[in-house]
Image: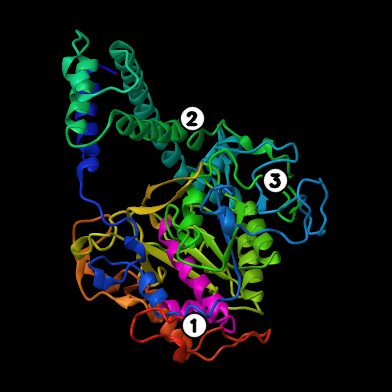
Amino acid sequence: MNRKFVSAFLFSLAFTLTGFSQSAPPSNWFLLDPSSGFPGAGVESLYKRLPANKKGQPVTVAVLDSGVDAQHEDLKPVMWVNPGEIPGNGKDDDNNGYVDDIHGWNFLGNAKGENVHRDNLEVTRLYAQYKARFEGVDASRLSGKDKADYAFYEKIKPEVEEGRASAEENFNLYQIVKMAIGELKKAIGKPNITVQDLKNFRSSDLRLKQIAAVLVAQMEEGSTFQEFEKQFNEEYDYFDSKYNYQFNPDFDPRKVVGDNYADLTERSYGNDDVIGPDAAHGTHIAGIIAAARGNGIGMDGIADNVRIMSVRTVPDGDERDKDVANAIRYAVDNGAKVINMSFGKGYSPNKEVVNQAIRYAMKKDVLLVHAAGNDGKENDYENNFPNDRFDKKGLFGPRFAPNWIEVGATHWEGGESLAAGFSNYSAEIVDVFAPGTEIYSTTPGSEYGNNQGTSFSAPVVSGVAALLRSYFPDLSAVQVKEILIQSAIPQDIQVLQPGGEDLVPFSTLSVSGGIVNAQRAFELAAKTPGKSKNGQKRVIASSDLNPAGDRVTP
């Protein structure tokens, strides 16, 4: 890496960091009604119509993710607590196969409390498997399944090798810049570096001068040195993970778990650490769904009277099919009525075991909410997993899971930018869009911050679904899905197609052609006859909704 290349990188970095000076929406924009000028989900307007003396039934929402900070000030009151388990006694008191599962379970650890943090991409795991099998083999002598497997290996080989080479180049570059930032801090010698400190800085080292210039530009726009360094470190960690773990075929962390990975029927492995080594992603999602409302702390989640069950399933890398299937089954068996799944990958070698778990959730009337992904591409059934299509229909079920809802992301600015540029889409596979940029929510350590991605659109839908299942428990999971789609507000406008530059009708990007809306969903739910098999009655009726828009008091 020469200085000229580093200089070009720093110019690029300066350009990307201008986001610090951009305008921003209200922190609760995703909860607002579209009439506010922001394309929110109509949650706050719904609460104004709900009578204060009508409380929904408790609903458990499982967050299958990286982990959830169960001690967060805004989440602790809403965490699911296993009523059949005695905390910390080292026993499986409720005989569900999991010891001390107080707030959920962790399928990425072992009984000693050790956890998997990072993992490969699924394509890297497949590459390593096929490389060991085919490296040095004369392909012309292969036939049948071996020939087909070799063709697949040849297909994925460049994806992994080119991905690793690109990640290595970026990682090495970021290492150079990270070292230079450290030298700059040491040279200035102050913990809180100011704009004036940077302007006064003198050095014969071109790298340090360029970094100082970038920092001056950012800080004069309202940023701080700490904010700059935090964002840079996040990008450094991203490329570190890509190079050293995700695209590294020699890295295999599964031995930490200690399960028989080949045995897809194995279920009782893991530990009770529902937080894990990095719960940032899952904690943010949990807050969107159900952070305690009206407590004057941090932010309000979407759903009241909801309990969050944390099922640790997703490492820094691709989730594994076995863990996903077990996580779904755990959530279903322990009472979850909605399962949020903000993850996805490009390959699924054991999709059938996930399909079986989806069928199990379908049989038990559980709604599965899945994020569409952030590749700015059109989803199909071969490029994004898990999905709602079963490999084959079979004798006792449908071809597609009717209890599955797929969610894309919208941008707070609306207009031509309404569909978030990173969001995946499909007129057949993505069911509905929901707010997914600048989403303010809980982060570990009782802190808060913004995030963006379809990962954070899915919990908006999960939160609204939980509200419906709380106030209308006689509605089935399939009915709730249909209501969410039918009540979505259509957007009859042209928008930039995600990942491209062409204008397309927003209506072509999803099944509903609209954005999820809590108020309209409630209105439709109140008119929909229930199909509950357990005789539960709805908490609220159409006549209970206050048409004036002011909350009704007892």
- Give the foreground label among 3 and 1: 1
Q: Position of residue 379 (x, y in %)?
A: 39, 62
How far apart in space, not on screen, are marks 3 and 1 (Cα)?
Answer: 56 Å
* Residue extent of the magenta highlight: 456-485
Name the residue located 45 percent from the left edge and 80 percent from the top edge.
553
- Local crowd size for mark 2, using a 10 Å CA cut-off: few (<14), some (14–19), many (≥20): some
Residue 4 at least partly seen:
no
Looking at the rendered structure, the secondary structure element under dot 1 is loop
Check disc 2 and report the residue beneath it.
244
Of labels 2 and 3, earlier in sequence is 2
Check disc 1 and report the residue beneath it.
554
Name the residue located 18 percent from the left edge and 21 percent from the top edge.
196
Query: Looking at the image, is 516 positioned above or below residue 417?
Result: below
The amino acid type, in three-letter code, at marker 2 is Asn
Query: Looking at the image, is 237 positioned above or below residue 425?
Result: above
Mark number, residue 261: 3
Looking at the rendered structure, the secondary structure element under dot 2 is helix
